[in-house]
Amino acid sequence: MRLRGVSKRYGPRGQPVLVDVDLDLAPGEITAITGGNGSGKSTLLRVLVGASRPSSGTVTGRPRQIGYVPERFPSDERLTARSYLAHMGRLRGLSTRDASGRARDLMEQLALAGGMDTALRRLSKGNLQKVALAQALLVPPRLLVLDEPWSGLDVSAHGALADIMAEVASDGAVVVFTDHRGSVVRTHASHIYGIAEGRISAMADAPQLITRLVLRGPDGDRVTMSIASVDADGVLLDALRRGWSVVKVDEPVSARGAG
């Protein structure tokens, strides 16, 4: 997938949000876009998935099967998580049975709390984010675009999300995500771009120390995750507050040598 000279402004006299963006996205790679609020990250993602047309420039090679998790996911729906995901699956060509089965598997992988029959508007921010991730994965995407995907997720879902992104990329899809934390993008991305005032530039893919954690949940399930070492203390503290116990913490290693 290729972007050439892509610019975006809202209204004929509006300030440019994207300026002459050139970007190559290859199958099997995970690309991170990092930048501050208002830098143009979310607009760039909307252009990538075709939800917003560029004011100038070209986008070529966009796959037909796209999974997209926007920064804000509708939270006022009366539909249950089960009904919503089954409906989205049918819109994408799945039978009701296949859509329901796929939704159930994804919700188990992401450990949805509250149950599949809870209305979306009654779910917490983190569990709503899990539903948003599931709807993007109901049909295996060839382009997976995630806007701040770790926002609000609980400890148990951090590792699951990283595994899902890696699985999608290993199947030959293009994966793009945004995050404002340098430690996160260095841990999970194979290529990193910074964006500021709508202009994008490649960043050095510096090695990042990661720590492997093994945790046990209140129900006895064990979860293994590899996270940026700078985030380990915060994740451990959050886990303990939620009733988890720590089984093992490995010594930090370079992300490039951790595979």
Image (cartoon, rainbow, N blue to C red):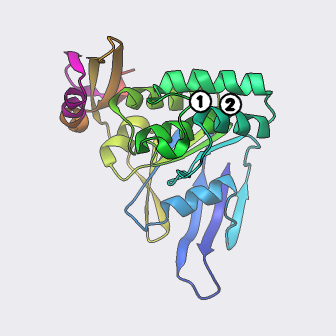
**Badge 2 is on which residue?**
140
Name the foreground residue: 253 vs 34: 34
Q: Is residue 249 visible?
A: no
Q: Position of residue 209 (x, y in %)?
A: 26, 32
Q: Is residue 244 magenta?
A: yes
Write down the region rendered in magenta: 235-254
**Badge 1 is on which residue?**
168
Q: Residue at x 70, y 66 (%)?
A: 53
Q: Residue at x 77, y 43 (%)?
A: 64
Specify few, some or many for label 1: CA neighbours under 10 Å numbering under 14, 14-19, or 20 or more.
many
Secondary structure beneath dot 1 equals helix
Residue flagged by tag 1: what amino acid is it? Val
Secondary structure beneath dot 2 equals loop
Q: Residue at x 59, y 88 (%)?
A: 13
Q: Position of residue 238 (x, y in %)?
A: 23, 34
Is the residue under label 1 in contact with that under label 2 (CB below 8 Å)?
yes
The quadrant of the rendering that contains the C terminus is top left
Instruction: Answer with the quarter of the image where residue 3 lies.
Output: bottom right
Up the image or down, 72 lies above or below 157; here it is below
Left or right: 208, with 43 as reference point:
left
Name the foreground residue: 205 vs 97: 97
Q: Which of disc 1 and disc 2 is earlier in sequence?
A: 2
